[in-house]
Amino acid sequence: MTRRLLLACAMALGLSQALGFAPAAQSTSTSTLPARLSDQQFWRLVTDSSEPNGFFRSDNLTSNELLYQYVIPDLVRRTRPGGVYLGVGPEQNFTYMAAVRPAMAVIFDIRRGNLHAQLMYKALFEMARDRTEFVSMLFSKPRPAGLRPTATVVELFSALAASPTSDALHAQNVRAIQDRLTKIHGLPLVPEDLEGINYVFNAFHTRGVAIRPTPTYADLMTATDEAGMSRSYLASEASFTFLKNLQARNLVIPVVGDFGGSKAIRAVGAYLRAHGATVSTFYLSNVEQYLYQDSKWTAFCRNVQTLPLDATSTFIRSSNNRGGGFGRGPGFVSNLGAMAAEVKDCGT
């Protein structure tokens, strides 16, 4: 072993020990990602990787990308399960995660409000026994009766629509979410964080599936890929259960960070390298549009260069197609890119 390799190994071990992560059973032949994070390890990775709260022009409580499932068949062909999923924004990440089956996921967003949304989801995933109970809690409605485990997602949301919203259930769920995060997990959430989580949850209560008037939450969940296959994270109990299990093991990490910032992506990259992990997927939405506008794309590219990548590591990006093209009409369309090749030369 060369002196340089020995030094690299020592640095990786030092970072792992500094963050308090003990190696666990390997998820692949080289990865030492933990099979579970303790609550303390989870929160340390959140806080040590995060940057100060940033600004975006809207809350982005739900996606507005109705065609987001179109790329999933190709995405599954390109990637390997057991890697690390990176993403941005709210619930669309869960659908991509259910498709690529990562060993760990990190969700970045420039807004701390997205961390609040992800913590709300974490609590609900852990508390819900199945998809029906999950959507019942998410929208503060009594559990629809008579739904089989094999019910389609269309049947699920049709039954939900017939169930009345309940203020009493909402109040009960607010307490349950806070207790789950602060008492069971012991997360040291400050009052502003608890207020932020309540703000997100209240939006689901007051607006229902029309959190965003179009597409609605029901539209997003009942959308399909181009061949008509339903692939949302609520389309099957198997997908929901995979995500519930990942959340219960503290392996969905929300991080506050600017893609073009100096800390968040690099800190996560250092942690993943220390554990011999590889990024399988990075969902960008249309963030690159804003990175170009703010002259931050080169900084983002160099941040991505610090991530552990291989030839299968794949970007998912969205672009505004309101002028038509691609044969898919107006709206956002998604496409895939080879991460390692795209960031090989970041320019000046």
Image: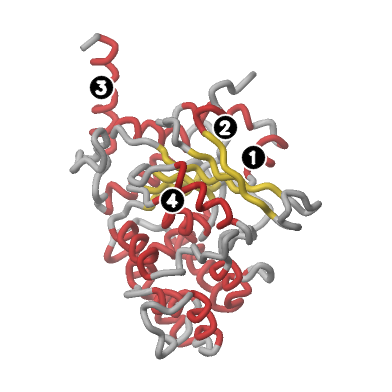
Q: Amino acid at mark 3?
A: Cys
Distance in Å between CA atoms under marks 3 and 1: 34 Å
Distance in Å between CA atoms under marks 1 and 2: 9 Å
Distance in Å between CA atoms under marks 2 and 4: 18 Å
Distance in Å between CA atoms under marks 3 and 2: 26 Å
Distance in Å between CA atoms under marks 4 and 1: 20 Å
Q: Say what secondary structure mark 1 lies in.
A: helix
Q: Which residue is mark 4?
A: 254
Q: Amino acid at mark 1?
A: Glu
Left or right of 327? Residue 280 is left
Q: Quadrant of residue 175?
A: bottom left
Estimate how packed mark 2 is, as few (under 14), some (14 to 19) or many (20 or more) residues with alpha carbons within 10 Å. many
Mark 4 or mark 1: which is in front? 1
The disc, 1 or 2, on the residue closer to the chain's N-terminal end is 1
Q: Which residue is mark 1?
A: 288
Residue 300 is tagged as 2
Identity of the residue drawn at 41% across and 50% down? 100
